[in-house]
Amino acid sequence: MKKIKLSTIIIFILFNIILNLLMGIPYFRFVSINPIELFFTIMAYLSNTIMIYIILFFILLLFYFLRFPKIIYIISFFILNILFIIDISIYQVFRFHINGFALNILLSKGGWESLEFNLVTYILIILAVICTFLLEYFAYNKITKLTETKEYFLNFRKIALLFAGLFLIVFIDKGIFAYADLHNISYITRHSRLFPLYQSLTINKFANKYFNIEIDKSIHIKLDKKYSGLNYPKMKLEFSDAKIVKLPNIIWILTDSFRYDMFNKDVTPNTHEFSKKSSVFYSHYSGGNCSRFGVFSLFYGLNGYYWNSVLGERQSPLFLDVLKGFNYDFKILASSKLNFPEFTKTCFVDIPVDKIFDEPLGDTKYKKDEIIANEFIKYISQKRDNKPFFSFIFFDSAHGSYDFPADFEKFKPTVTSFNYLLLNKNNILPVFNRYKNAVYYDDFLIGKIISNLTQKGFLKNTIVVISADHGEAFFEKGFYGHNHGFCDEQVKVPLVLYIPGHKHREYFKLTSHNDIIPTIMPFLGCENKPEDYSQGSSLLEKNEREFVLSSTWNEIASIDKKYTAVMSFETYNIRGIKTFDSNYQEVFDKKITENMASRFVNAQKEIMSFFK
């Protein structure tokens, strides 16, 4: 077998780089004509291609030294380019890249049909496959002939200049994005997922620590709606004054990691007592298994999948925009900083800094929780105007270290400290009791808040929501903590909804954090259907949903009363759907898994409905 020249491989790689750059031009239909935005996306596209091909170069270099035949190089680039064509096509339709979700649509029963492909589309797909292979085949042979008749040399100086140029492009790309993220320049940050496998760079903590840059006070350059990739809301909201007697005050109280079975008269006596005059939802699920996606779904009424797009565009929640339009006052209180997760760049991006109190000066979590509770009580005590208000209160004691004062040690045995790495199901009880004591303490603070609202007459015109961002597992299903799976202990949370004039009711239907906004909006006079602005429905309607969706960093779960199906939506993870039973044990029944896959396929249009 004739030895392949290294110069042939290098020129073949360069040919495919140019080919890929040309093929990827359709990505730029999502880029505006803003010169800075256009410059950044070009740099990012070049940088991303460079980084992918550097990895590919070393793989092909290994092939070269192992003396692989030429067909391997042709097939490698053929597969790469077919995947690239598929990715471009998927992105233009769904606004995401090749991932588990996309593959399941393509490979699942009924998936192709759901895309409504016609005969012309099938013919174009076949032609694209044939033409791509022929192009690679003939290009490789042509390059081989050129390198046989002429020697190509790269000396050290040329190589050094080449790598310097490549490094400069990558540096410009990462530098622009880091600066834009630091200063909330949404024209740039919204493109963090425009290209497949693109890795953005953020330096917020570094800039704050070493340059004392106040991240929360950074400028916010708002994106023009016509350039947005989001169709949020789908329709202009219409309001009727005739439906409003008086605008209600609205209070949301979240206890971090407050899972569903902690809602009872022993652990949360005050919340339990308050629930007797409220609506209680016993099959309620957070929009995520961590704070980021749980809080996001609550404020936006959208699935957690939208987090990255909303963060990139610095898109404020429609609900808070509506409240601002009605001249609501805001009081946002949290025991820990709201810049990580990036709630100051999403949920509260348009809330003035002086309306956010998230740095209480306590030296413990429980002390900080006490401070924000007292801060809210002080706020309503000093309120003299008739201006309606929205308040968000986010307690932190039940999160992580499970903090509480000594006189709230109700559940024993407990521990004063513990090592996460040494925990297992045999020694978890004292830690679990510590967690229960922390929830018990936060419930005490909630009781203080409810008592003050009652004494000052606010409950006559105040909607109160008591819930959690997510739950917390203690090895019941093999997991500890949260952010690791979608078992009930991590994503099923309490929901107590108090609405003035509404009697106590108990609901056992499946409900979601996505449903909170559609429940409250009619009390503001909104006449639109929930699907115009959210992916939820009113909690007060008699509808029964088949399943709820919950998200984490790289996965989305469909949860019903029997099964939980989990699917990746990241490019680097393209495994299929995994299905779990009520004990969170994986189900290997092919028919059940196919049914769960079909559910995702059928729901894909709804899931992606808020992208343009």
Image (tube, rainbow, N blue to C red):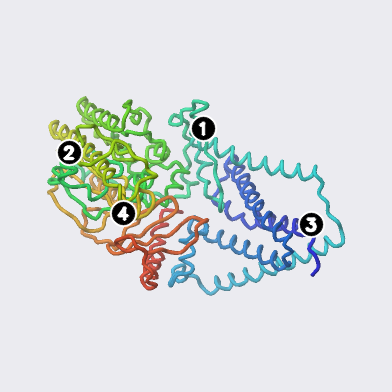
Q: Which residue is mark 2?
A: 461
Q: Is residue 533 shown to the viewer in this render?
A: no
In the image, 368 versus 286, the foreground residue is 368
The local crowd at label 1, few if under 14, some if 14 to 19, many if 20 or more residues have their Cα within 10 Å, is few
Image quadrant holding the N terminus, namely bottom right
Residue 43 sits in quarter: top right
Is disc 2 surrounded by few (<14), some (14 to 19) or many (20+) residues within 10 Å? some
Disc with the residue nearer the chain's start (4 vs 1)? 1
Within 10 Å of disc 3 (Cα), the crowding (few <14, some 14-19, many 20+) is some
Q: CA distance from mark 4 to mark 2?
A: 24 Å
Amino acid type indicated by mark 1: Phe
The three-letter amino acid code for the residue at tag 4 is Gly
Say which residue label 1 marks.
Answer: 206
* Residue visible at 58% across and 62% down in the picture: 83
Q: Is residue 103 left or right of residue 401?
A: right
Say if residue 577 shows up in the picture.
yes
Mark with earlier residue (3, 2) = 3
Question: Which residue is disc 4 drawn over?
Answer: 536
Q: Nearer the viewer, mark 4 or mark 1?
A: 1
Q: Secondary structure at mark 1?
A: helix
Find numbered disc 2 in the image and state the secondary structure of the residue it sits on: helix
